[in-house]
Image (cartoon, grey):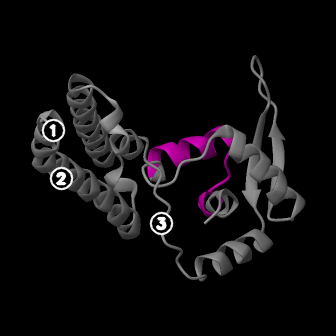
Amino acid sequence: MDVKTIILGFLSYTEMSGYDIKQAFSNSIGFFYDASFGAIYPALRKLEDEGYVTKREVIQSGKPNKILYSITEAGREAFRKEMLTPILPPVLRSDMLVKIFFGKSRTPEEQRELMQDCLEMQRDLLKHTRHSYQDLQQHLDEYQRFCWEYTIHHLETTIAFLEQHMPALLKQQTACPL
């Protein structure tokens, strides 16, 4: 799914600024799909050119004017159609896994530090995700709760995997070759 479609999904709830859309990405689906301002604003321009969103300027005193985007009926229809397309396999991009993949190029101490950092990062992510979920849970529908709980489960499983397999990996790295 592309950024444009997700933006249409967010706008199907309410009128939003580009900043609001970025916050929606970060605070709702950021674990499994995030977008930068550099992706959001060009997507909004394309959506406007395609007639899927409209924008209006809100005059603000003492600060820059705000641009709010709304979904059009054509945008709602495009979103509905995209939601009915087949699900594509996930594309996993993980800085952590790339660094572990090339872990053999590190010293044994650097390898231990890398694995500890990976584990600590996952624990921090889990803590933050649980906290955010508790704060937002009452405002989520059952499908959104499902996604948050999936994310928490994924993080818990990743932590358990790291905890289980790290000792053997690190022991193997420090073993003397024959």
Between circles 1 and 3, the one closer to the viewer is 1
Tell me the kind of residue under disc 1.
Pro
Q: Residues within 10 Å of mark 1 (few under 14, many from 20)?
A: few
The residue indicated by pointer 2 is: 161
Q: Is residue 41 above or below residue 71?
A: above
Write the residue at 45% across / 51% down: 28
In terms of sequence position, does the residue under pointer 1 or pointer 2 come before the other? 2
| Label whose residue precedes the other's in the sequence (2 or 3) | 3
Magenta highlight range: 9-28
From what the image shows, is residue 162 above or below residue 74?
above
Residue 128: give x, y in percent of width and height. 30, 38
- In the displayed structure image, the side of residue 126 where residue 58 appears, left or right: right
Tell me if 110 is positioned left or right of 83 in this view.
left
Q: Nearer the viewer, mark 1 or mark 2?
A: 1
Determine the residue located farthest toward the top in the rendered image: 62
Furthest residue to the right?
A: 49
Tell me: residue 79, above or below residue 28.
below
Q: Report the residue at 27% width, 35% height from top.
A: 124
Residue topped by disc 1: 177
User: How dense is the environment of label 3, judged by Cα within 10 Å: few (below 14), some, or many (20 and up)?
Assistant: few
**123 part of magenta stretch:** no
Question: Which quadrant, please, contains the C terminus?
Answer: top left
Closer to the camera in the image, 21 or 161: 161
Instruction: Identify the element where label 2 is drawn.
Output: helix
Q: Secondary structure of the magenta portion, mostly?
A: helix
Q: Position of residue 92 (x, y in %)?
A: 46, 57
Residue to which mark 3 is pinned: 90
In the foreground, 1 or 76? 1
Mark 1 or mark 3, earlier in chain: 3
